Image (cartoon, rainbow, N blue to C red):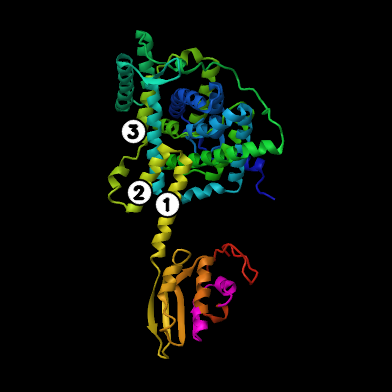
Amino acid sequence: MIKPTLAAFAERLSIADWKNTNISTFSPSRIKTEILSGLTVALALVPEAVAFSFVAGVHPLVGLYAAFIVGLITALIGGRPGMISGATGALAVVMVALVAKHGIEYLFATVVLMGILQILAGIFHLGKFIRLVPHPVMLGFVNGLAIVIFLAQLTQFQITDADGIKTWMSVVPMANMLGLVMLTMSIIWVMPKISNVVPAPLMGIGIVAAIVIFFGIDVPRVGDLASIKGGLPDFHIPMVPLNLETIKIIFPFALILAAIGLIESLLTLNLVGEITGKGGGASKECVAQGIANTVTGFFGGMGGCAMIGQSMINVKSGGRTRLSGIAAALFLLSFIMFASSLIEQIPLAALVGVMFMVVIGTFAWQSIKILRLIPLTDAMVMVLVTVVTVMSDLAIAVVVGVIVSALAYAWNNATRIHAQTTFTPEGARVYQIEGPLFFGSIEGFSEIFSPKDDPDLVIVDFLNSRVVDQSALQAVEALASKYQAMGKTLQLRHLSRDCHQLLNRAGQLIVDSDDDPSYGIAVDYSIKTGILGAGH
């Protein structure tokens, strides 16, 4: 039986978190900052959601509804107050193949299943494995995502002709766009030095929008992307056959989407935590993302996850509590229902300027300075993750970075194994093993010994070593076989009780001692003793 149940788990996530919130922190000044921060985020969400809808091949409202529902639910019960979630490009690029081949109804069903998988990941605390992501991978992720955000904004400087071919703007429109982008960035940079009454990004958007509308400057606006006018999302059960064939179609997509969404969300969780100096609950975030996506699938949304760009806008604008995320979602819904005509007049240049400032603030510039100071492997991993994030997608980049880091770690430990040799007064040779014995170091372990040249009694002392896995056990068994074949006696000292039980041929050669270590051995199959090792 799974404890806690899903209902109890979700209730604990939300109610306990709100009860622990200090009401006194919600002063009028704080409430104003949170609401204005949410408004700024909502304005930046509109073009992003519309653009990602186009990437996925669905109607813009599908992306906007996802941004509203996912953003609202994760703001209410997510693992990190102040973090913003919505429709993202990382998910959209996976969805496009599903939509093109099977249609949008299969997308909604996939999003529901994606959410269920994420809820299970949270219940079983799989989010804790995000701690296995090394810091160089984190830096590569941040830098790569900053570059992706920058490159995504460049499409706003392009126009699409009748044949659907994109070309760069001509000189005058390009100059107008660049001028307004620079003006927005300048306002965002200067405003904090003058006043913090209104978030600088919101002030930048407001001033530039007012200039464009008042003077009638001919530049692309939000309405040029698509109309965002709509109503409340309707409850809608995905119209797909409920059979095994449907599961075979949607499960692979759901699994990939769930993994990508959780990786991006948990890495953003850590990043926002580092900036604000407050931790977050990984399992709580997994469940929140899962509930949000499950609900979104039933209300005609394309699903989503944490958005690092909008999260950075929120944090830099002063958003620190759940109120800013809730405000952002509600503002977005109000744009759709009541203020679409006004929002569609906002120049894209203002929003591009905001995102460019996000890029500048997100990119880990210090990582460039430390490239020559950190180990070469860490530097290579950082650059590799950045490149793969830009060229492919975030999930692949993180997985590649973790694998390379793990292999580098395994290689470093494999080269550490060695032995100090001494002789007892009786003439026995003692090998004092130093370093971990695992699959990567077994070759070096075997090369330490000289069975032909050793005396009749050989002692192998593992006091300063550790037998880690089944490959190590097999190496010890093989060593015992060599000495036994030559009629020599081999004694094994300071092995853990696990080794006592799991070793077969060499088991009778172990010398018990009061100071034998106690640790678990990880093996992946049963041996003749019948014991299954799995980290005893």
Quarter of the picture containing the C terminus is bottom right
487, 154: nearer the viewer:
487
Can you identify the residue that label 2 sits on? 380
Q: Gap in Å between the C-alphas at discs 1 and 2?
A: 9 Å
Residue at 28% x, 44% y: name it.
369
Query: Residue shown at 68%/30% (left/top)?
Result: 240
Q: Amino acid at mark 3?
A: Ile
**Looking at the picture, how far across and down is residue 365, in whole percent?**
31, 40
From mark 2 to mark 3, how far is it between C-alphas?
A: 22 Å
Type of the residue with mark 2 = Met
> Would residue 346 be found to the left or right of residue 514 on screen?
left
Dot 3 alpha-carbon crowd within 10 angstroms: few under 14, some 14 to 19, many 20 or more: few
Span of residues in magenta: 482-505
Residue at screen point 60% across, 33% down: 111
| In the displayed structure image, the side of residue 286 where residue 384 appears, left or right | left
Q: Is residue 248 left or right of residue 488?
A: right
**Badge 2, how many Cα within 10 Å: few under 14, some, many 20+?**
some
At label 1, which amino acid type do we have?
Val
> In the image, which disc is placed on residue 232?
none
Residue 404 tag number = 1
Q: Is residue 304 within the magenta segment? A: no
Question: Label 3: which residue?
Answer: 360
Q: Is residue 362 visible?
A: yes
Q: Give the answer, above or below, for where 360 lies relative to 534.
A: above
Q: Nearer the viewer, residue 22 or 133?
A: 133
The location of residue 43, given as percent across then percent down, is 45, 22
